[in-house]
Amino acid sequence: MQHVIRYEGGYERNFGTLRSHGSEYEGDDGDRHLVMPWPKGGDGVRFSFNTDGPEMLQTTLRDELRIAVNAGIVTKDELVQCGSWAREASFIGRMDS
C-alpha cells in the first residue's frame, strides 16, 4: 500500500476554477500547470470538510458543503464518503478502553 499526499495550487488562487477530477491549476507564478498523474498503486488520502469558528467566519458546514458541490469540487456521493471517513476518525461518542 502506497499512501499519497498531494498539494497542487493554492485554494484561494484556484477556488473559482476547482472541479472534481480537474486537470490543471494556477501556480504561484500565475501560469497554468497540468496536474501530474496519480502514482500507480497510490491509494490517496481520506479527507473531510469542517468549519472552525463558524461564528467568526459567518459560515456553516452546510453552506460550505453546498458551495463545494455547486462549484463542482466534489459530488454528493463523494460528500457521503467524506462524512463516513469523518465519523470513523472522530473521537466524539467513541469509548476507548
Image (cartoon, grey):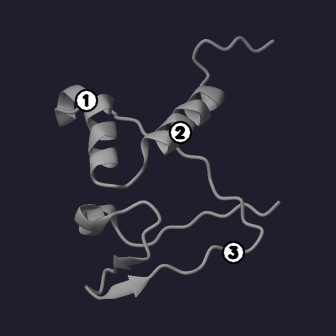
Residue appearing at x 33%, y 47% in the figure: 68
Depth check: 79 or 7 in front?
79
Q: Are marks 1 and 2 in contact (CB under 8 Å)?
A: no
Q: Is residue 48 visible?
A: no
Residue 82: which disc?
2
Amino acid carrying mark 2 in the image = Cys
Assign the N terminus to one quadrant of the image. Answer: bottom right
Foreground label between 1 and 2: 2
Amino acid carrying mark 3 in the image = Pro
Check disc 3: other Cα within 10 Å, few if <14, some if 14-19, many if 20+: few
Residue that protrudes farthest toward the left in the picture: 58
Between the residue at mark 1 and the residue at mark 3, the CA separation in whole angstroms equals: 36 Å
Which residue position is annotated with label 3? 39
**Which x, y percent locates residue 11?**
32, 62
Which residue position is annotated with label 1? 54
Between the residue at mark 1 and the residue at mark 2, the CA separation in whole angstroms equals: 20 Å
Rendering quarter of residue 37: bottom right
- Helix, strand or loop at mark 2: helix
